[in-house]
Image: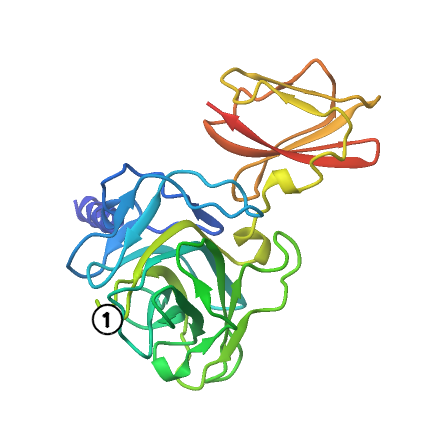
Amino acid sequence: MKKLYFLTFLSLCSMGYSQVTLPHYDGLDYATGSALQTQTGWTALNTGDDLAIVAGSLNYTALQVSTGNKLAFGGAGIDAGKDFTSQTTNTVYFSILLNVTDLTATTSTTGGYIAGFVQGTSSSFGGTLWLNKVSESTFNIGVNPRTTAANTVYSTGPYNTNTTYLVVISYTFNDGTANDIVKLWINPSSLGATEPTASATATNAGTDLTSVGRLLIRQGSATDTPNVELDEFRIGTTWAEVTPQNSANVNENAIAGLKIYPNPNSGSTLYVTSDLIGDKSVVVFDVLGKQILKVANATDNGINIGNLKAGIYMVKVSQDGKSATRKLVVQ
């Protein structure tokens, strides 16, 4: 009987707490009109107006194609967190698409933060993303090791309203105390490969975080949080995991006459053909870059994709020393 009580206790605990593993992607594929904090994996951290899911996606040409809807909020209200496997060493990244739509009500001269990492489920935040109004149509973007406004380092700006930016933030744990480093990239010069030079960097001068295990989305106040839209949330431990390239920009025409069809695909066979002679290597990746399927010697007779779940995939084809990557939609 004691064992039964213990198992029941563990079950109840697991129902009240869940976390995602890294790398993690959230394209906000939630119903229009719903609230972010009510979605599976997200937790409301206070009270107030909702973090609203609205129709449409933000898009950034060089980044992997957007899915789902987007998030819109401004002023004060509910904050939300998504828990992930706790990290205590090395570097952790998150990336988002950001569009500031209205700065009219923003009057703060020090700015405010709208996202960041959280130490466990506490109120200790780090690697925070800051916005600071410059004019009615421009703003600066900054990063802070913690949350003291004076420690925010802003990138060279300003940036324009109603424009989508790819923003990446990293938090690096260093041995010792008061020396963790945060970095910020805005429209980075390279995606999916080697980490480029950051737009802004700051070294913590106070108490470092001991871990990060939650992504925070925050509504500060009516004076420091402008109206914003966010989309395409990614969390990972490498640069490549949070900056996957758009297949349309990766060797799109490297293989003459390359065709991948039917696409969208609702069957179990995918045909990959080209003007070149010889077998092809075909590798299928999910949106997080995880290899799902590999066929070393694919022929024009087609490959079996019957085990793929509905969703968006990247198909990399290699033939005759050349390679190309295309998006595949499985229905």
For residue 106, side relative to residue 156 (left or right) = left
Asked whether residue 87 appears in the rendered view, the answer is no
Please give the name of the residue rendered at 77% of the width and 31% of the height, measured from the top-left corner.
Answer: 255
**Residue 125 picture location, percent across and down:** 34, 71
- Graded by Cα atoms within 10 Å as few (under 14), some (14 to 19) or many (20 or more), the crowding at tag 1 reads some
Residues 37 and 136: in front is 136
Classify 279 as above or below 196.
above
Q: In screen coordinates, is 306 left or right of 279?
A: left
- Going 51% across and 84% down the picture, which residue do you hit? 176
Residue 111 sits in which quadrant? bottom left
Q: Quadrant of residue 145?
A: bottom left
| Foreground residue among 71 and 211 | 71
What x and y, as percent, mark residue 276?
82, 23
Q: Residue furthest front?
A: 136
Q: Is residue 186 above or below residue 124?
A: above
Position of residue 108 in the picture relative to residue 247 (left or right): left
Residue at image coords 74%, 18%: 299
Q: Percent from the top left, x then y, of residue 135?
A: 36, 70
Whether residue 77 is visible here, answered yes or no, is yes
Q: Quadrant of residue 296?
A: top right
Say which amino acid is labelled 1.
Thr
SS category of the residue bearing label 1? loop
Residue 264 located left or right of residue 195: left
Image quarter where the N terminus lies is top left
Q: How is the image coloured?
A: rainbow
Residue 292 in percent (x, y) is at 58, 34
Q: Which residue is mark 1?
A: 223
**Picture mark count:** 1
**Above or below 231: residue 120:** below
